[in-house]
Image (spheres, rainbow, N blue to C red):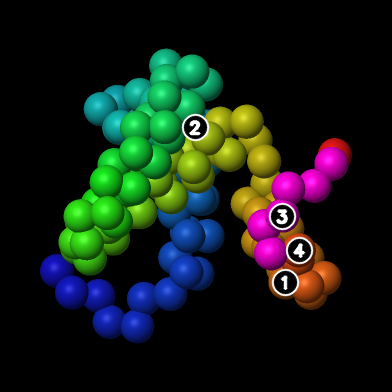
Amino acid sequence: MKVINMSWCFLDELYRIIEERRDKPIEGSYTNRLMSEGLEIIVDKILEECLELVEAAYKGSESDTVYEASDLIYHVLVLTAFIRIPSSKIPEELMKRRLSGHDGGKIRDK
């Protein structure tokens, strides 16, 4: 299935769906299963997807990298919805970094 002109705005819709699954579970839903299993399982999935993404990137496969990046993004959204971070917080943080001329990923003291 080819989607034309898809943008990152779809993530807002996906986040709403994930929140809906959290608040109104649907039997058989993978999202619902993750939510019911809890934080540790969700974090384990994120770690697994991170490794798979890195492996795909090193392999040099664009299709595998896109697939694994999508898995990772989905699981990060599940985590943020699980701990009830409002969907606007991450884009706000990214925009704040963009506008402040973020320090290029340097480690900073908290």
Q: Is residue 56 above or below residue 49?
A: below
Does residue 106 belong to the magenta stretch? yes
Identify which residue, 49 or 56, lies in the foreground: 56
Label 4: state its secondary structure: loop
* Mark 1 or mark 2, whichever is nearer to me: 1
Query: Among all residues in the image, which is located at the extreme left?
Result: 1
Identify which residue, 11 or 56, lies in the foreground: 56
Range covered by the magenta-colored residues: 104-109
Which of disc 2 and disc 1 is earlier in sequence? Answer: 2
Which of disc 2 and disc 3 is earlier in sequence? Answer: 2
Dots 3, 4 in contact, CB < 8 A:
yes
Report the quarter where the C terminus lies.
Answer: top right
* Mark 2 or mark 4, whichever is nearer to me: 4
Say which residue label 3 marks.
106
Which of disc 3 and disc 1 is earlier in sequence? Answer: 1
Say which residue label 1 marks.
98
